[in-house]
């Protein structure tokens, strides 16, 4: 593989690029840890604020909001911390990926990469915010408007409600990372027999992560959502003309 790339890029230095990738990975990991620590101090207030945004009749002290699985709630809490940390560093990932790939790209490829990175690391966080503060409240408004049984006290499972937004957010983040990974393999000409190297592995990992992260509320839809997410990543990455190496 090294000799193949060297034949296409005369100034290719694989060791230098590996060191640069290692530096980027270490910098990103350190920043992610810092952001997770930062969000861990405010996650409880954020969850409480978001639950208050929902159009649910919970009473002044959230009397009808319950937690039926404390360990599940603890898991969701830390999943939210990691998710917020990842979303926070998406712009940093975007800048580092572009800086790393830019020297080996033609102008049309640079424009294409910028578009993909903006979609994956700038627009996706905006979509996630709209899901939390617009789509889910609207969903609950429609649910409340459909009515409820007379004479019954309705109790809401706080962890189940929160997991809905978490699941959709994780799907979008996994899609972003998969799209960027597939795009980089195409940009650097990691093609054999007309197919991206590691493509099937990346798609399999993406599909598995989506299936594992979706909560029980999405049973019956996990496989469909996972396949659609991986397929969309593949379609977006395929929009770049490949640089074939024989």
Image (cartoon, rainbow, N blue to C red):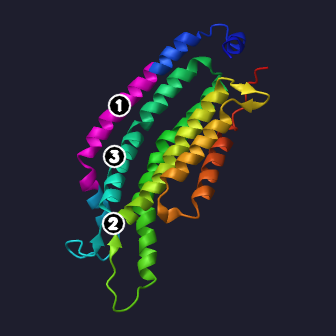
Q: Quadrant of the C terminus?
A: top right
Place of residue 100 in the rendered image (x, y in percent of width and height, measured from the top left): 52, 21
Can you identify the residue that label 1 sits on?
31
Can you identify the residue that label 2 sits on?
158
Estimate how packed mark 3 is, as few (under 14), some (14 to 19) or many (20 or more) residues with alpha carbons within 10 Å. Answer: many
Left or right: where does residue 44 sit relative to residue 132? left
2 and 1 marks in contact (CB < 8 Å)? no
Is residue 4 a member of the stretch shown in magenta?
A: no
Q: Quadrant of the N terminus?
A: top right
Place of residue 169 in the rendered image (x, y in percent of width and height, measured from the top left): 46, 52
The magenta stretch is 23-46
The answer to which of 116 and 237 lies nearer the viewer is 237
Q: Main secondary structure of the magenta part?
A: helix
- Residue found farthest to the left: 61
Can you identify the residue that label 3 sits on?
81
- Which one is in front in this view, the residue at disc 2 or the one at disc 1? 2
Tag 3 or tag 1, which sits nearer the N-term?
A: 1
The answer to which quarter of the image holds residue 88 is: top left
Q: Secondary structure at mark 3?
A: helix
Instruction: Answer above or below: position of 75 versus 110.
Output: below
Seen at 47% across and 50% down, the residue is 170
Q: Secondary structure at mark 1?
A: helix
Marks 2 and 1 sit apart, C-alpha to C-alpha, by 30 Å
2 and 3 marks in contact (CB < 8 Å)? no
Place of residue 174 in the rendered image (x, y in percent of width and height, measured from the top left): 52, 44
């Amino acid at each position: 593989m090294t000799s193949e790339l060297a034949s296409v890029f005369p100034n290719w230095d694989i060791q230098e690029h590996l060191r640069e990738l290692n530096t980027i990975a270490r910098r990103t990991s350190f920043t992610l840890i810092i952001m997770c620590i930062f969000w861990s101090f405010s996650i409880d207030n954020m969850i409480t604020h978001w639950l208050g945004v929902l159009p649910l009749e919970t009473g002044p002290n959230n009397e009808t909001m319950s937690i039926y699985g404390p360990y599940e709630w603890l898991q969701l809490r830390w999943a939210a911390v990691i998710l917020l940390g990842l979303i926070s560093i998406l712009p940093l990932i975007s800048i580092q990926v572009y800086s790393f790939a830019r020297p080996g790209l033609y102008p049309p490829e640079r424009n294409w990469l910028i578009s993909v990175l903006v979609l994956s690391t700038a627009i996706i966080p905006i979509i996630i915010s709209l899901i939390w503060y617009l789509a889910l409240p609207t969903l609950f408004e429609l649910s409340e408007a459909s009515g409820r049984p007379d004479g019954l006290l309705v109790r809401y499972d706080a962890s189940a409600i929160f997991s809905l937004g978490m699941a959709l957010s994780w799907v979008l983040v996994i899609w972003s990372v998969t799209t960027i990974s597939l795009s980089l393999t195409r940009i650097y000409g990691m093609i054999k027999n007309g197919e991206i190297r590691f493509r099937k592995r990346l798609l399999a990992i993406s599909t598995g992560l989506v299936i594992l992260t979706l909560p029980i509320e999405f049973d019956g839809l996990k496989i469909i959502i996972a396949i659609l997410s991986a397929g969309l990543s593949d379609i977006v990455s395929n929009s770049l003309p490949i640089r074939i190496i024989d």
